[in-house]
Amino acid sequence: MNLTKRFMHSRGRAGVPLFALAAAVLITGCAATPSKVDPLEPMNRALFRVHDVADKVVMKPVVQVYAAVVPSFARTAVSNFFNNIDDLFSGINGLLQGKPQKAGDDFGRVIVNTLFSLGFIDIASEAGIERGNEDFGQTFAVWGVHSGPYLFVPFFGPSTFRDATGTAVRVYLGPTGYIEDVPVRNSVLGLSAVDTRYQAGDALDIVENAALDRYTFIRNAYFQRRRYLIYDGKVPPEQED
Amino acid sequence: MMRASAWIRRLLAAVITVALATGVAFAQEAPDALVKSVSEDVLQTIKGDPRIQAGDQARIREVIEAKLLPNFDFERMTALAMGRNWRTATPEQQKRLTDEFRTLLVRTYSGALNQYRNEKVDYKPLRFSPADTDVVVRTAVAKGGGAPIQIDYSMAKAPSGWKAYDVIVGGVSLVTNYRDEFNNSIQASGIDGLIKTLTEKNRGTGGK
């Protein structure tokens, strides 16, 4: 069940080098209008295998240690802290998409959570203000940018050229860029990556159970999920992205 | 004597009336009420069953078989996931596909339920008219820290009551997601190839 939120909605930190590449191909990708969603399938499958091995060998064990060593309340605090920053960007993207009401909720959440706990406690959710989930990829989509080819990015998961560009913008604006001290910045980035994987939880195991071919399964789920997010749950029937 | 048998007759009549009434009520239970009662029943059972709490996968599957499955229309689900390939399958193939797909979904579902940790389910009331025969029942599962996950059920009215034919998790339709996978498999090795793949998949994950 986790699958949908964390895993499909890549939250974008790290991965700056992608920006130039993604931006360049996004422009050409727009002009070409690919007939298939995944013209780069052979490359993507190779990257998927890399991701898969890295996840089994590195990320999963690291997250297991993290879950074993760090007490539950601290893990929740870490998640809340990074989620709070995501909420700020969700608000910004809500505004960029002309949804002031949704943006207001997001900003309200950030203000409440930051003032009362520096973001470590999600008081706003307790108070019933639901988290938003807008991001730059969705904003571009609302502005009329097509998804471009599917792209599987190791350590990030499924994406498209449009969404990867959004992720790159997010990382570029990100707060980690403002941390001057390199070891501290890298630690925060590392913790953020661990937290993202931790929040994804066992979603990947469910995919493993369900899928005949995990690559196709995840790709389909990603496109469905993004369409759902772009239309805020009101997907027009028979809509092809 | 006379009185006793009259009394028994009256009792029998009452029992039959009640049985019929509840049967009818059950068949006509509104789809959103049905989703709620079935979900709560399954979740309460899982919470209260010591064998499930100890991680007994077979027992979870039993509960799903008994409580959840009667409310799903697996043939329709399989037909939808097969798309246009469904009509080219023989009745025998259709039956095997439905059986295997059903098993796969039960395994997946029991794996997901195994991760259930007391999250709260919010059942959205459904606005529908008595004439409706196809509805979407919406629920949301609250996860600590994250946004709630939307879980919706597409349901159609059958003579025996409302039955679900698709589950949509966070905007991802299960049936739609399988359509490509099924199609790819059929393109590569035909309908029998897909049946074989499903069977092997079900046997393979059985050991876990």
Image (cartoon, coloured by chain):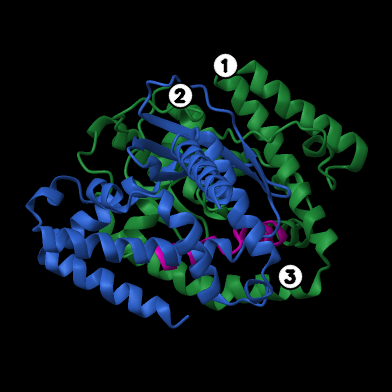
The chain identifier of the residue carrying mark 1 reads A
Same chain for labels 3 and 2? Say yes or no.
Answer: yes
Q: Secondary structure at mark 1?
A: loop
Label 1 neighbourhood size at 10 Å, few (<14), some (14-19), many (20+)?
few
> Disc 3 and disc 1: Cα gap in Å?
39 Å
Same chain for labels 2 and 1? Say yes or no.
Answer: yes
- Foreground mark, 3 or 2, reads 3
| Residue at image mark 2 | A142
Figure chain in blue = B
Q: Earlier in the sequence, mark 2 or mark 1?
A: 1
Q: Which residues are magenta?
A: A190-211
The kind of residue on which mark 2 rests is Val
Residue B80 spot, x, y in % from top left: 25, 45
Residue found 42% across the figure and 47% down from its top: A222
Residue A122 spot, x, y in % from top left: 81, 42
- Foreground mark, 3 or 1, reads 3
The kind of residue on which mark 1 rests is Gly
| Residue at image mark 1 | A98
The kind of residue on which mark 3 rests is Ala
Q: Secondary structure at mark 2?
A: helix
Residue B185 drawn in magenta: no
Figure chain in green = A
Q: Which one is in front, B146 or A168?
A: B146
Confirm or deny contact between disc 2 and disc 1 (CB under 8 A).
Answer: yes
Q: Residue furthest front?
A: B1
Residue B66 spot, x, y in % from top left: 48, 62
Check residue A67 in the rendering and tell me which mark sits there, or answer none.
Answer: 3
